[in-house]
Amino acid sequence: MNPKHLILTLLLMLCPIGMAAQSTITRNKPKPAVTKPKPATKPKAKPKTKPAPRRNSTHHSSSTSSTVNLSAELNKLINNMVYVSGGTFTMGGTSEQGSDAYDDEKPTHNVTLSSYYICKYEVTQVLWRAVMGSNPSNFKGDNLPVECVSWNDCQTFINRLNSYTGRNFRLPTEAEWEFAARGGNYSRHYKYSGSNYLGNVAWYYENSSNRTHPIGTKKANELGLYDMNGNVWEWCSDWYGSYSSYSQTDPTGPNIDLGGRVSRGGHWYRLPGGCRLSVRSNAAPNYRGSDLGLRLVLSQL
């Protein structure tokens, strides 16, 4: 056989085999997998934590809240100051006090006072706490009178109060206290501050249930002042001393310590005889008790 014919014959024989193989390869070739793109995985939620407070903002917030409370209490205090027009009165155990008057309430004497302002209420615990940042009282309650404060504590409180307000708050003199308790120039010469019946104007032994009560819940006196008798004794600025019969103008008491500082008005567990207009008491400047608080005065508003 011609060699060319032989080669051609071999090629023709191999062609179907190649095509079959190609078909097999094509048929058996795996189809490319169609894969759907996986959805993006959500990031894992981080555990919820409260953001760390920033010192500046936290301090500012606390300071603002504190300032608002203090500001509100100071405005309330100033709005509650009552004008007492100056005048002359007889101080001490006057006739309406009868036989109840003690020896240290005598002799009676004339006192002339300049005008001043006095708060219609005793200093409350909420005001004390706003100024001082603490509440030393035994009987707790925002509108109860602050107590367990010494005369010295009161001076610290007043100094801070004055720095906040730019005013000159102070404790009343003993004479200022009594003139205001008597109703000033509007006095009706009652035995107690605003009435001849103590229960109308005061929390005392017979009605207090052995504790202080919210300010301003009894009847006011002629000047609109509350709790001048009962609830708590009120510190005065004077040193305690004996009276003289001489007339005086704007007296401030002795110049030296003869028996502590004066307090006036009686308190929640005193009997009626100890809650009269002219009754006096005294204590060391560092004494603290649940029967002793304060009331504020201004010479000028």
Image (cartoon, helix red, strand yellow):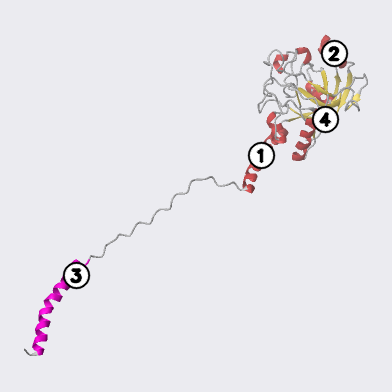
The residue lying toward the viewer, choosing from 78 and 24, is 24
Specify which label sits upstream in the sequence, 2 or 3: 3
Q: Which residue is mark 1?
A: 66
Q: In the rendering, at what x and y percent does residue 133 appear?
A: 70, 35
From the viewer's perspective, tell me whether residue 245 is left or right of residue 46: right
Q: Is residue 12 left or right of residue 124?
A: left
Q: Amino acid at mark 4?
A: Ser
Residue 32 screen position, x and y as percent? 26, 65
Q: Measuring 39% from the left and 54% from the top, which residue is drawn there?
A: 41
User: Amino acid type of disc 1?
Assistant: Ser
In which quadrant is the N terminus drawn? bottom left
Q: Give the percent coordinates (x, y) of residue 158.
A: 78, 34
Task: Indicate which disc residue 102 carries.
Answer: 2
Select label 4 or label 3 by which is in front. 3
Callout 2 environment at 10 Å: few (<14), some (14 to 19), or many (20+)?
some
Say which residue label 3 marks. Answer: 26
Q: Which stretch did the figure color magenta? A: 3-29
* Residue at figure coordinates x 78%, y 31% from the top left: 153
Which of the numbered marks, if any, corresponds to residue 115?
4
